[in-house]
């Protein structure tokens, strides 16, 4: 059996083994436990864990209610839809989620993206038809589940940290600047940051001073409460868990109040407005107005709505991808911090199931919230069951507290949003990139500035496109080094794919074929771990061009699986050698017209073998035994270099 036939047989057997093992693993008990992570932690659930989950769930619940109301305004929906989006995800994630810290619900960034799509139903464009936001949650869920089932979670790996940082920062600026009008008590319609900036100064004279005073007071209150929370955290860390309860109690109470500062602010502001209304002066401050009471109906989204594609547009792709990216970044961050693991595709399925279920309770797309997840973790949550308590708090608020929400001032909700997003702006990354790698400032700017002018969705697409081009550039322009030692020696510094074919042909033409004294060339394939069909075709054309001039193209240090592809490429005039020195020696003999008997016999052997494989190879070797030893060494090197190339490409 020839080496080629042996390789083909081994490849077939390896494929069958992989398929068999893959089917076995898919239906294994462990695999199904991974698909329903609740089956892993529920059997070990204890009362002590339950108490920790209840405390964490209550704390997060007090945070999500004011945030949900505030984020609904960013999504350009009636405020109650923020609460509709805050409970179902917690229940679904309980069964499918792998992170104990994640809390799924409305977030500032997802709300901003949802607000970019839909059908306005008021003259200012501040409120959209909820039908399309609900449909967006439905399609978002389907998209994410399909991606998870087909194991496409790796797609988000191609969105770099630079693009994510730029996206987060520009989103925070858009959200914050868009809330200034509510802080000032003025109204106007706008779609982008530039238009916000223009209309803000155009309508600045319409500022309502009571709204402005209340808004600034709310921001100062939140800053004071945050300072108190941080101070209490430092004191609690110094006291330690073993410290006396009477010493820890006041600091713990201050920490809880600081953590729930948004809820405290909303309660105080609504209480003041209630008292003001009793005195007949409520008209001076802008309130949120009536909020629909009761639980949302459980029904499927309206798939018969008009012009779904027109109103949702590119959001059908952008929102599920960004939602998953935000969720997995948070989940992996807390997993590393707290010593457990999460799997990207399972998280994708879990998030998709949350959004799909959300669409049946009139919710818009949601994802993991960093701020609430941080509170959840700091509150000592032990399992995803903490989300059940959070969801229950939201349901109770919907059922019994919605009449009181009408007294919440818009300026106070704007303060909640402004103070939340201000910490999302990553201004330090600019100086870091300037010091480390200036070229990475290009995708950052490609996201940032177009987002301010054209909108977040278009800026994100432009930034990701620029980032991918930077990633592909080294593949199209691989590093190389050219030497001349009687012949032209081309040393490639990385693997090659089809975009690099034209470059390699140009180099060989300029350095040898098109010169006054053309010579044969040697191409060093040491760092080439794999090639594709286009590369093979390019090599075939190059070899033919050199053959017409009576010259040769010699390939050296060719790895086993690359050699296998070349053997099956039907390339005439193909020469492969084990080293540069061997190639130089043989090319010199060939150029002088002096072929030794040994070379002729080896050539005859190669021709005989090529009749079985359909390709012609001419390789000079000391002995068959040496060939086999070298082949074994190259198989090992193949695996090592292939792994290195994969890591290099991913970076």
Image (cartoon, grey):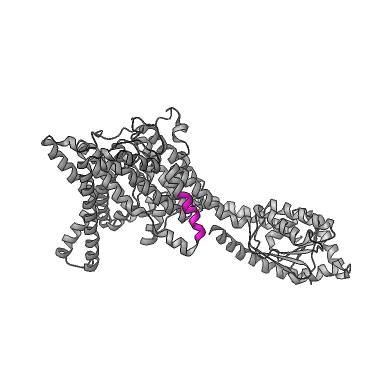
Total labels drawn:
0
Residue 258 x %, y %: 22, 55
Q: Main secondary structure of the magenta part?
A: helix
Viewer can see residue 86: no
Residue 578 x %, y %: 74, 68
Residue 145 x %, y %: 46, 43
Question: Residue pushed farthest left?
Answer: 279
Reply yes or no: does residue 445 show up in magenta. Answer: yes
Q: Quadrant of the N terminus?
A: bottom right
Whether residue 147 is situated above or below residue 252 in the rendered picture = above
Q: Nearer the viewer, residue 464 or 637?
A: 464
> In terms of image quadrants, where is residue 134?
top left
Viewer can see residue 17: yes
Reply yes or no: does residue 420 show up in magenta. Answer: no
> In terms of image quadrants, where is residue 398?
top left
Residue occupying the point 43% across, 59% down: 430
Which region of the structure is painted magenta? 438-447
Residue occupying the point 43% across, 48% down: 324
Q: Nearer the viewer, residue 572 or 190?
A: 190
Residue 190 x %, y %: 37, 37
> In terms of image quadrants, where is residue 3?
bottom right
Residue occupying the point 22% across, 62% down: 231
């Amino acid at each position: 059996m020839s080496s080629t036939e042996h390789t083909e047989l081994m490849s077939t057997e390896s494929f069958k083994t992989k398929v068999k093992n893959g089917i076995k693993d898919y239906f294994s008990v462990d695999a199904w436990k991974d698909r329903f992570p609740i089956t892993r932690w529920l059997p070990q659930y204890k009362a002590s864990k339950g108490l920790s989950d209840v405390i964490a769930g209550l704390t997060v619940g007090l945070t999500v209610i004011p945030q949900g109301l505030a984020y609904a305004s960013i999504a350009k929906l009636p405020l109650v839809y923020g609460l509709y989006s805050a409970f179902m995800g917690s229940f679904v994630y309980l069964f499918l989620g792998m992170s104990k810290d994640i809390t799924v619900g409305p977030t500032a960034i997802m709300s901003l993206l949802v607000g970019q799509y839909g059908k306005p139903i008021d003259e200012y464009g501040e409120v959209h038809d909820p039908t399309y936001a609900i449909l967006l949650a439905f399609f978002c869920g389907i998209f994410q589940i399909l991606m998870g089932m087909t194991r496409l979670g790796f797609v988000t790996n191609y969105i770099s940290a630079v693009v994510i940082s730029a996206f987060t920062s520009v989103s925070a600026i858009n959200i914050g600047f868009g809330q200034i009008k509510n802080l000032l008590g003025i109204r106007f319609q706008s779609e982008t940051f530039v238009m916000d900036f223009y209309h803000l100064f155009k309508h600045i004279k319409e500022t309502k001073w009571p709204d402005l005073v209340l808004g600034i007071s709310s921001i100062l209150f939140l800053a004071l409460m945050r300072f108190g929370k941080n101070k209490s955290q430092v004191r609690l860390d110094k006291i330690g868990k073993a410290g006396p309860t009477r010493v820890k109690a006041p600091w713990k109470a201050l920490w809880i109040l600081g953590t729930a500062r948004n809820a405290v602010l909303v309660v105080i502001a609504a209480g003041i407005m209630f008292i003001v209304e009793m005195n007949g002066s409520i008209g001076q401050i802008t309130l949120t107005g009536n909020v629909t009471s009761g639980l949302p109906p459980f029904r499927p989204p309206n798939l018969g709505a008009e012009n779904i594609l027109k109103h949702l547009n590119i959001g059908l792709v952008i929102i599920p991808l960004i939602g998953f990216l935000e969720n997995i970044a948070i989940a992996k961050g807390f997993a590393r911090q707290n010593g457990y693991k999460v799997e990207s595709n399972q998280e994708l399925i879990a998030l998709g199931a949350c959004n799909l279920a959300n669409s049946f309770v009139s919710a818009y797309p949601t994802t993991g919230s960093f701020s609430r997840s941080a509170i959840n973790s700091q509150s000592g949550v032990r399992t995803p069951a903490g989300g059940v308590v959070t969801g229950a708090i939201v349901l109770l608020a919907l059922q019994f507290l919605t009449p009181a929400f009408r007294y919440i001032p818009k300026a106070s909700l704007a303060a909640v949003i402004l103070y939340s997003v201000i910490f999302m702006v990553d201004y330090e990354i600019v100086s870091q990139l300037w010091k480390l790698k200036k070229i990475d400032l290009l995708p950052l700017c490609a996201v940032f500035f177009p987002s301010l002018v054209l909108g977040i969705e278009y800026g994100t697409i432009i930034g990701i496109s620029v980032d991918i081009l930077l990633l592909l550039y080294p593949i199209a322009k691989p590093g190389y080094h050219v030497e001349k030692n009687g012949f032209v020696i081309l040393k490639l510094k990385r693997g090659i794919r089809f975009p690099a074919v034209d470059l390699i042909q140009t180099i060989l033409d300029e350095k040898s074929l098109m010169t006054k004294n053309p010579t044969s060339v040697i191409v060093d394939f040491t760092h080439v771990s794999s090639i594709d069909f286009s590369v093979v075709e390019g090599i075939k054309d190059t070899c033919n061009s050199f053959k017409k001039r009576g010259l040769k193209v010699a390939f050296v240090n060719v790895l086993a699986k690359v050699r296998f592809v070349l053997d099956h490429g039907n390339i005439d005039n193909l020469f492969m050698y084990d080293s540069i020195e061997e190639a130089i020696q043989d090319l010199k003999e060939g150029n002088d017209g002096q072929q030794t008997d040994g070379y002729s016999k080896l050539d005859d052997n190669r021709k005989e073998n090529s009749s079985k494989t359909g390709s012609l190879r001419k390789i000079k070797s000391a002995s068959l035994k040496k060939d086999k030893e070298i082949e074994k060494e190259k198989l090992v090197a193949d695996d090592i270099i292939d792994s290195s190339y994969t890591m290099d490409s991913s970076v």
